Amino acid sequence: MKKELIAVVLLAILVALAAVVLPLRFGSPMKSDMDDYFLRYGQEQTGTNNQCTSVTFDYRGFDTLGESTVFFCAVIGVGLMFRRMTGGEEIEDE
Amino acid sequence: MSKLVRFAADILYPVVLIFGLYVVAHGHITPGGGFQGGAVIATGVALVIVAYSYKEASAWITGSGSMAREVIGLMGFIGTALIAFFFGMPFFYNYLAGQGGLFGVPVAFGPNPGELNTGGFVPLMNFSVGIEVWGGFSLVILYLLSGLLRRRNGEEEES
Amino acid sequence: MMLWNLPFIVVAILTIIGLAAILLKRNLIKVLLGINILESAANLFLISLGYREGGVAPIFTLAPSTTMVLPTPQALCLTSIVIGMATSALLVSFAIIIHKKYGTVELDQIRRLQG
């Protein structure tokens, strides 16, 4: 009973995704005003040749700052799980 | 692992390291950048850890060294963005682009053969992020391997 | 018939496969693989939204033409890949701790948190 219910829900999600995805046109984006500005003035304002790097580190630098912090916190989280490697105490429940 | 694999890892680790640092350093001219180059260096670290046993590999790539690299990377990233306060500009302003100092040659619009001296503070940030990803990946691999070994040995002989 | 939209159809199929793996499998490692497939589908959707017909990579070093694809979705996809990696690292360490405490990774037999 439960597996048939999940299969019906997945089929409904597939139909909804297809209805969203099929009218899109691959190869002509709908709005590209911001990216046309980045491609036209990126070399003068940032001085780089690589526009992906200039968007990552200069025009949208706050996203990269947040992502570096998330990466750092993930490594700290993995270290909290296995704490005896650097000489800490491992707390046992039983 | 056998002696041939260990010899190959000895030879290949500096080569992979230098190629990863090349991808990081030329991130503003060719495809690449901080995260991509850091992932290449992490591949070299994984090669060393697979070829040697855990005791020998953790004497070569230490946990404290990786932690230091990760912290220096993140602090370098934030510090490079904070220095813009000394120029009277808001946070994250590109204070080196087109000024003529370090990394400051101006670039005109259009295709051109790339020059390494351009780019503003983007190469400095590429280095910071590359070193942070190097330290972070090696630390995660060492932690997971030490956790698995401790569980297999029954928690008898780990410090 | 609809071959001009092929990347978007692949995105829909990958999403359904990922969701089916998360909802229908019992082993914890297979659920983690389903989460990874779902994240790959989202990244593919981001990249294929920014394609322009006849465009080259948005790098001006020795570029063959000036008609380029959009650079912003590629920057967002980079962030998404790193965050997916962070999620996967934490989930794998959870799986190792669960195996140490319960002796198994089958979700049917981990019952001490219920009720």
Image: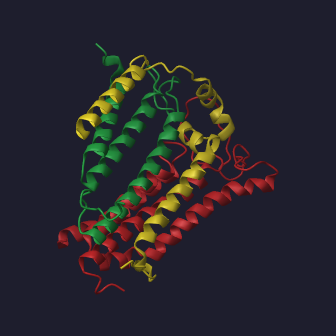
- B7 to the left or right of A40: left
Residue A9 falls in which quadrant of the image? top left
Q: Name the residue: 51% across, 52% down.
A: B34
Q: Name the residue: 57% across, 43% down.
A: A56
Q: Position of residue B56 (x, y in %)?
A: 31, 79
Badge count:
0
Front residue of this view, candidates A8 and B159 = A8
Residue found at the far front of this picture = C115
Q: Quadrant of the N terminus of chain B?
A: bottom left
Q: Position of residue A24 (x, y in %)?
A: 44, 19
Front residue of this view, candidates B153 and B129 = B153
- Taking the image as drawn, is residue C60 in sight? no
- Please, is residue A6 above or below residue B152 in the view? above
Q: Position of residue C109 (x, y in %)?
A: 24, 61
- C64 to the left or right of B156: right
Q: Name the residue: 42% across, 38% down.
A: C43
Q: Name the residue: 48% across, 60% down.
A: A74
Q: Position of residue B40 (x, y in %)?
A: 39, 55
Residue found at the far right of this picture = B88
Q: Quadrant of the C terminus of chain B?
A: bottom left
Colour scheme employed for the rendering of this structure: by chain
- Please, is residue A70 above or below residue C98 in the view? above
Judging from the image, what is the letter of the chain drawn in yellow? A
Chain B: drawing colour: red
- Please, is residue B22 above or below residue A12 in the view? below
- Taking the image as drawn, is residue A69 in sight? yes
Chain C: drawing colour: green
